[in-house]
Amino acid sequence: MTIAKTNPESDKLAAGARRSLDEQGLNTGPSPSQLGSRFITPAELFFTRSHAAIPSLDAANWRLRVHGLVGRKLELSLDDLKHSFTAREVDATLVCAGLRRTELENVAPIPGELPWGLEPISTGTWRGIQLRDVLLSAGVEEDAGHVWFTSVDVVERHGKKFAFGGSIPLAKALGPEVLLAYELNGEPLSPDHGFPVRALVPGYIGARSVKWLGEIEVRAEPSANYFQTQAYRLLAKRDGDDGNVRNGTEMNETPLNAVILSPEAGGQVPAGAAELSGWALGREGAPVMVVECSGDNGDTWTPAEVYASGSPWAWQLWRATLTLAAGSHTLVVRCSDGRGLTQPPDVKDVWNVKGYGNNAWHRVAVEVRA
Ligand code: MTE
């Protein structure tokens, strides 16, 4: 069996509204049943995560300023980007750090954060230019250590208004996979995905893929932006901690992860051979080598077939068949990358103050009918 990269027929069937987590429709995502039948997520289903209103930008007047520890400051228009640098394409999965937060909330409350389930993950074909080409053109100075991205949107936190931003280490910024992207799935980025240009940092949490990019600054230290210093940090609260995530560790790489897309939690399945399917995502571009499923909450395991799209930065898809008797079952999936990296078995092991990076074994309770 093979799985197609794109599948217009299943796209038509899967089309329909994304689930929205807020009234303005800034934070939306597909349901599990809309994913998993092809590698590339259609743009209209692709999840969105925006911390403030979507800025309305005019491509003709848009400029990208490149400054900081560079030999030569640059100010680039969209035409400069497209005509002075070589266009590149990368199939990459974008995943929000808050994916699977609702499972963590069952351990202990996580106030003030969006109740994301399986929605905030999608895979696209991104087109743009390599960030490294722009950095090399500007000339990076010796003390450079981090590349800051700053947007033009206006976020409000604790009474202060500022633009969304974040940074990545210079070594990552020079990787061939990191793009200044202006297209998703063959079309110009839509306003909600960062038109006209966004950073695309495959393998890192979505927060580093800054949309509506306005500035790139090369600095010795990581970004001082709120979303680098006070959010997107991991802190497992222990007795005596004040729970301030400033004291946590900066989150960059997305962890090894796998989920069951079908059957969905709370679903009903006929007794006998049950088909399970889902996605698996390696860490930092390393492929997932083994995906295993259990129909008895982890007592016994069955290997799944794993399919790859050909891009190390895109999720892999998997299929497994389990024989299930009538009754209540907890289905589980876990994966490993063949280099010793495995997933934590229990959500309690990964609970953290802001509810980021849940990559515990994914469990789905279903009813098997006789
Ligand atoms: N960039 C800006 N300027 N503002 C934002 O709110 N959200 C980030 C990132 N880039 C954000 C941003 C987060 S948390 C994620 S997960 C991704 O964008 C989501 O990208 P998407 O909306 O295209 O799926």
Image (spheres, grey):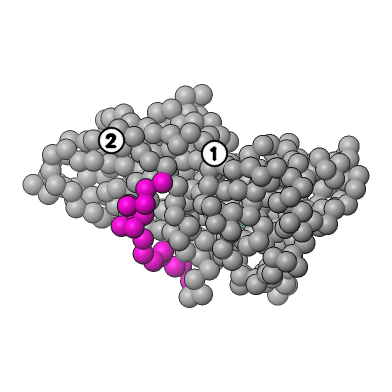
* SS of the residue under disc 2: strand
Q: Quadrant of residue 77?
A: bottom right
Q: Secondary structure at mark 1?
A: loop
Viewer can see residue 349:
no
- CA neighbours of label 1 inside 10 A, class few (<14), some (14 to 19), many (20+): many
Q: Residues within 10 Å of mark 2 (few under 14, many from 20)?
A: many
* Badge nearest the viewer, 2 or 1: 1
Of residue 155 and residue 248, the one placed in the foreground of this image is 155
Q: Earlier in the sequence, mark 2 or mark 1?
A: 1
Q: Amino acid at mark 2?
A: Ala
Residue 186 vs 141, above or below: the answer is below
Instruction: Specify the segment rendered in magenta.
Output: 6-22
Q: Is residue 262 above or below residue 304?
A: below
Residue drawn at (54%, 44%) of the image: 92
What residue is shown at x 41% (from left), y 58% (from top)? 30
Residue 313: which numbered mark, if any? 1
Picture disc at residue 320: 2
Q: Is residue 233 left or right of residue 283?
A: right
Q: Position of residue 170 (x, y in %)?
A: 76, 40
Could you tell whether 331 is left or right of 288 in the image? left
Q: Is residue 135 visible?
A: yes
Please name the amino acid that badge 1 sits on: Trp
